[in-house]
Image: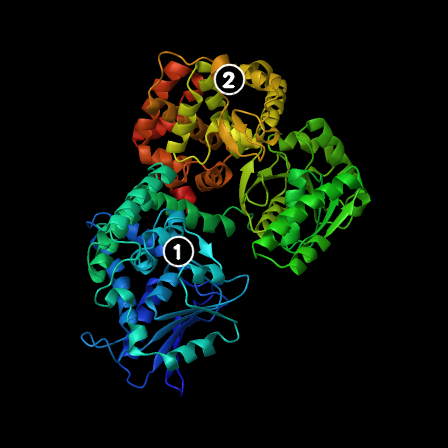
Amino acid sequence: MSEFSLEIGTDGIAIVKWDLPNKTLNVLTLKGIEELENIVDELLSTKKVKGVVITSGKKDFAAGMDLNVLADLQANTMNQKNEKIFEFIIRVHKLLRKIEHGGMNEKTKKNGIPFVWANPGLSAGIGTEIGLACHHRIVAKGNRSKVGLPEILVGLFPGAGGATRVSRMVGLMASAPILMEGKMFSPKDAKNAGLIDEITSSDDLIDSAKNWIISATDEVMIKPWDKKGYKMPGGSPYHPNGFMTFVGASAMISSRTRNVYPAAKYLLSAIYEGALTDFDTALRIEARWFTKILTEKSTSNMIRTLFINKNAIEKGLRRPKKNQENKLENIGVVGAGMMGAGITHSAALNGINVTLIDRDLESVNLGISKISQILETGVKRGKLSGEKKQEILNRINPSTNYSDLCKTDLVIEAVFENPEIKNVVLREISNHTDEKTIIASNTSTLPITDLANSIPNQENFLGIHFFSPVHKMNLVEIIKGKMTSESAIALAFDFVRQIRKTPIIVNDARNFYANRCIIPYINEGMIMVKEGVPAQVIENAALQLGMPLGPLQLIDEVSIELAISIAHQTKKALGNDLEDNGIGNVLSLMEKNKRFGRKVGAGFYEYNERGKRVCLWQDLKTHFPHRKDQPNFSEVKSRLALIQCLEAVRALESKVLVDIREGDLGAILGWGCMPWAGGPFSWMDLKGSQWIAKKCEQLSNKYGTRFQAGDLLQNLAKSNETFYEKYATTLK
């Protein structure tokens, strides 16, 4: 089946329609490139064609390039000096340049065929780059309509001419949000940014495109950079204004990426070098830098985790295969606090009716008020209408009566992280629901198998661990207890996908997978504070690893009060088996000074009256004086990186984590663990198992057994294998 179709009307206007078979979104494949090449060549050689409209047979235009194509290029061309990658990119450049020229006479710049991009909805990546090559760009208005170049978010940059075209259209400064931040723009914002020319209704999209073609002149078909005397907006690199802009951009990129994300740096290099040449040479320069980023091992890891593995996981890689798919209509949520309200919002937003229960209506209404605030923010930003907001709120049934849960398919307990309280609530839920109802706990740390003792039918009990804030965090851990059935796991998986989040399935153990790794990361930060390492050194080391937050800022955001509670619960459960690493002294200090984190305006950081971070708590160094023999900065980085990675390996060894693909993806989505490297296992593969084992030996001799490498890692080092090599057979 064809991916592109061509229809030439009696008016002489050709409609090229992109409609990838058996897919909800268009992505550009190798076959699609070949088909579009053939269609463009045919149109440019057909005299009767007066103009071309490029549109979509779907509700959206395109989600971008099929990253499997890029992954295959990466895998198959590493030993061919990158020629194949470069040739592929140049091939795409030539295709889009053909569209841009429209078959016009090279000397006179006349007698060309105008191309109009008619985008019915969303367009990202190569979809937008096709549009940029056209002579006029029209987008249908509507909430689903978005235009952008988000490649930077997966470790790439717009390499099909996007970097060169956008920077020459609007200048480096104005192109920064488009190219360097990967923003997706509404039609109005896209027009203001210079990405599109016109906004119309869906019904008028094709007619508007045809009308423009009819009135188009030779002059409007010539792109600014193809005109004599073209000057780059804002100034070229050697222009006084342009020079300062490029200097500022370089500093900005270093500040934002901490030099761990090479794509942004390569993007700026492509723009800078290209701005010194003619347009066609600039495209070759862009292709060269895009080839370079594609051949970076970290880039291939990032694509593997955030695209290939993510897609596989979300499509049901680990979902029990023999269980029928579920579409939930009614669920219950017990606990209307921050987490319960967040879960309720996500469910109601995606068409599920929710019975929200708490001890009194005041508490329930407070939870609904939080949901209303989240929705109102969406209304203000134009993401949903006032009518849609009310429709979502109408799906929520506030209650204090457990008997209202009788018709639900799933009930999620989301009360305070205390086993005694949770056990009471779970018994109440069980007493008022059908024996077939799946019951889940939103616990973040407590073993599911222990909590299951409150449920008569333990096969229908599991953990569904959401991350805070629920409406922003996409990861959900599904925790399989000792007695949890496959059908319960399947239903939970289907629910998480129904609310458009990413599920990973892990086995039961205290702290599960994500928190099991997050807690040591936070603890290591506090241990170093106690040792006398300056807090700013700790935080900066984390940021230079590519972590979104340093360990001290992270605990401030999560709540130091919660950390204290978890520490008490862990101590109670493990007793003498719990390693005494000294963090109790740090937590006691914070508790004594009522510095419980951002929510109270005081933690490891100081906050202003609006809750904005101002600086680190200055008195911290008074209580924990800075040591005279400060550790090497690279050692601080290694400690923060390895402490979380080693815990991920231990989770794999103990079979809490079953699949390293889920380990990498869960780490990135759950706590932002080195996305540039593809996650903890991918990072260790980048470093090499022998380097990791040696560094573990050094750190364990110096700082204790928490840095000891287990048998699994030691065996990898002996054979000099990587995680993805070792487990390749199990990951197919």
Percent across and percent down for residue 716 are: 35, 30
Q: Identity of the amino acid at label 1?
A: Leu
Q: Report the side of 302 relative to 397 (left or right).
A: left
Percent across and percent down for residue 129 are: 35, 62
Percent across and percent down for residue 292 are: 25, 48
Q: Quadrant of the N terminus?
A: bottom left
Furthest toward the bottom, the residue is 10
- CB contact under 8 Å: marks 2 and 1: no
Q: Residue at x 61, y 25 (%)?
A: 561
Q: Residue at x 24, y 68 (%)?
A: 227
Q: Nearer the viewer, residue 390 or 436?
A: 390
Classify residue 40 by image quadrant. bottom left
**Mark 2 = which residue?**
619
Q: Nearer the viewer, residue 586 or 232?
A: 232
**Label 1's element?**
loop
Q: Please tell me which of labels 2 and 1 falls first in the chain.
A: 1
Q: Identity of the amino acid at label 2?
A: Asp
**Mark 1 = which residue?**
149
